[in-house]
Amino acid sequence: MRALVVDDSRAMRALLTNILRGIGAEVVQATDGRDALEQLRRTDALPDLVLIDWHMPEMNGLELVKAVRKDPAWKPMTLMMVTTESEHENMVRALLAGADEYLIKPFTPDALLEKLNLLGVPVPEQALAAVTGG
Amino acid sequence: MTLTEREEDAFPFFQDYIFAKSAIVLTDEKRYLVETRLAPVVQQANLRCLGDLMRALMRGDRQLETAVVDAMTTNETSWFRDNSPFEALRAHVLPERITANSARRALSIWSAACSTGQEPYSIAMILEAHFPELSGWNVEILATDLSQSALEKARQGRFSSLEINRGLPAAHLLQYFSRDGAHFQINDALKRRVRFQQLNLAQAWPVIPPQDVILLRNVLIYFDAPTRQRILAGVRANLRPGGFLLLGAAETTRELVEGFVPISVARTTVYQLKEI
Ligand SMILES: C[S@@+](CC[C@H](N)C(=O)[O-])C[C@H]1O[C@@H](n2cnc3c(N)ncnc32)[C@H](O)[C@@H]1O
């Protein structure tokens, strides 16, 4: 699986990247919406999954979701917001714009893996068992 | 709690006591767990040490009994835990039971160790989202647990964002919850679908109406083999013929009592009680 992590916080990018690599994903990073869009346009290996922060300079996460969903070629990508933004209305806006899932910061690694499982992203049994067991 | 004098070892008492009250087996390696979980109980009750707590319990202090039992249960849970069992419910188990019960127009589901409510509420969401044909049916979701504090939280239906993050699909969050400060409150319509009640699986059960589906997930792991056998026999006695049992992902089927047929569906296994 290939994943793109879009977040303006270096620490958050590192955390998400670590968890994703832990389940065997290939991960690339972008620092905001514009950076992400540029990378998506250039790449010949589209990510299967994009994790998107909301509040970022240049282009925010909601705008990025809208931009991605405009291009039919990008339809197969699964988009998940990962953000502190948890106002009901804004969550609705993100889903209506085409985000597939939503994870509220702060979160635990198991919560991220459970969401991926929900989205049908293959999560190795041991990884899930390690975080949800007991 | 400093040890100025040599304290007696209360651990064996707690092993026996917890087993008697809940059937939860605490092996010798669980000494640390007992100490860390009971330390807050000792403190809250203004006692000095586990020995004091032991003596209070021996005198039959009911309030402390509840606090100790609650502290020793592990309430770890999540929404749609492991996902595939709930997929199996939606795609196979519920449709089959609905067909079987179409004359009676009644359906009963029991979450037999419901912890803080995520499991029965997940079922309620599935019913609400996927089975509109059940309107006008008598649908009962019974949710029971040993832990009073877990049940209290379940009844309130108020969850932190950390809890909400654990496996709840965003669309369900938006549809079935409202914001309440930093928390999320499950809506009344869903709450009304679930009846919470205390029930100790390890002791004699109250009378329960015959069930179509029983979820007994991630609880047998705490018990010894005879207790597991007894509980599974109880489950069988309370299931309708053709009804289904769902176990936790890690739970074995080796000692399943006779009469169940394993069925593979949605990347998981459910157990159907044979029709007689
Ligand atoms: C790990 S939780 C599992 C919750 C849920 N079924 C799930 O799979 O996510 C285990 C639950 O079993 C309950 N439990 C432990 N001993 C019990 C007993 N003797 N009778 C009823 N419930 C018990 C605990 O209180 C706890 O809420």
Image (spheres, helix red, strand yellow):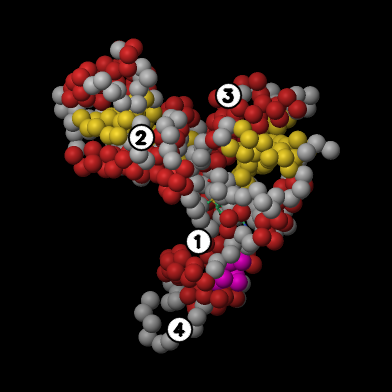
> Residue B71, labelled with which disc?
1
| Nearest to N terminus: mark 4 or mark 3 | 4
Q: Position of residue B98 (x, y in %)?
A: 70, 26
On the image, the x and y values in percent for residue B8 come to 49, 83
Nearer the observer, A26 or A11: A26
Q: Which mark is residue A65?
A: none
Question: What crowding class fits label 1: few (fewer than 14 Cα within 10 Å), some (14-19), or many (20 or more)?
Answer: some
- Quarter of the C terminus of chain B within the rendering: top right
Q: Under tag 1, what secondary structure?
A: helix
Residue for badge 2: A103
Q: Where are the magenta residues, as a range? A: B14-19
Image quadrant where residue A45 sits: top left
Q: Amino acid at mark 4?
A: Glu
Amino acid carrying label 3: it is His
Pointer 1 and pointer 3: residues touching (CB < 8 Å)? no
Going 42% across and 32% down the picture, which residue do you hit?
A121
Q: Earlier in the sequence, mark 1 or mark 3?
A: 1
As drawn, is A27 to the left or to the right of B190? left
Q: Nearer the viewer, residue A127 or B199?
A: A127
Q: Amino acid at mark 1?
A: Ala
What whole-number distance in Å separates the C-alpha atoms at marks 1 and 2?
Answer: 29 Å
Read off the chain for label 1: B
Q: Main secondary structure of the magenta part?
A: helix
Q: Is residue B35 left or right of residue A80?
A: right
Query: Which amino acid does the dot numbered 2 rest on?
Result: Leu
Residue that carries the numbered disc 3 in the rendered image: B130
Residue B259, percent from left and from top = 77, 44
Question: Is B18 colored magenta in this rendering?
Answer: yes
Any part of residue B159 in sight:
no
